[in-house]
Image (cartoon, grey):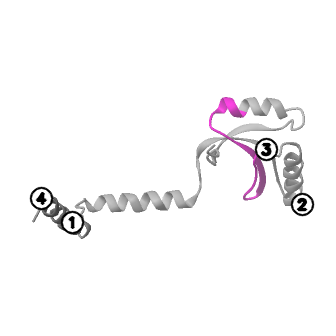
């Protein structure tokens, strides 16, 4: 048998044995618990701490309709800025934007202050910005 055939045969046998190899991972059970917790928290979709500008809050009869009107008014004027309608018993609240810093939120507040005179910045859970 030639050297090339022997070398080819050995490489073939090694490749066949390699394709059937198994990998066993030995890890602490706490790792699985942490991964499960991470998945659960991320699936809740609450976002992360940041700031939003609150442009409306009201309660009582017709509060939901007034909140929807205020939100629609905002979206027409600023379609690129997300607007959120929340209910925090007994108030309907409209908050806008997803700002990482208070400075960003205040800068935006200053740009809308004429139209939304009672708006103010407050801490909130925000959605992550889109990945470009």
Earlier along the polypeptide chain: callout 1 or callout 2?
A: 1
Extreme front residue here?
2
- In the picture of the structure, the residue carrying the numbered disc 3 is 80
Q: CA distance from mark 1 to mark 2?
A: 78 Å
Answer with mark 3 or mark 1, whichever residue precedes in sequence: 1
Give the overall secondary structure of the magenta segment: strand
* Residue 93 on the magenta span: yes
Per the image, the residue denoted by label 2 is 62
Mark 2: few, some, or many residues within 10 Å (few <14, many ≥20)? Answer: few
Disc marking residue 3: 4
How many angstroms separate mark 1 from mark 4 (CA)?
14 Å
Q: Secondary structure at mark 4?
A: helix
Q: x%, y% of residue 89? A: 72, 59
* Magenta residues, start to end: 81-105
Q: Earlier in the sequence, mark 4 or mark 2?
A: 4
Front of the two marks 3 and 2? 3
Disc 1: which residue: 12
Q: Nearer the viewer, mark 4 or mark 3?
A: 4
């Amino acid at each position: 048998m030639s050297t090339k055939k022997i070398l080819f045969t050995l490489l073939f046998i090694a490749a066949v044995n390699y394709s059937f190899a198994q990998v066993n991972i030995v890890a602490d059970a706490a790792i699985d618990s942490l991964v499960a917790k991470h998945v659960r928290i991320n699936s809740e979709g609450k976002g992360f701490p940041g700031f939003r500008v609150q442009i409306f809050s009201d309660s009582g009869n017709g509060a939901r309709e007034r909140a929807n009107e205020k939100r629609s008014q905002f979206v027409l004027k600023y379609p690129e800025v997300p607007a959120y309608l929340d209910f925090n018993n007994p108030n309907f609240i409209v908050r806008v934007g997803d700002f990482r810093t208070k400075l960003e939120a205040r800068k935006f507040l200053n740009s809308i202050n004429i139209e939304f005179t009672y708006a103010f910045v407050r801490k909130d859970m925000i959605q992550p910005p889109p990945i470009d």
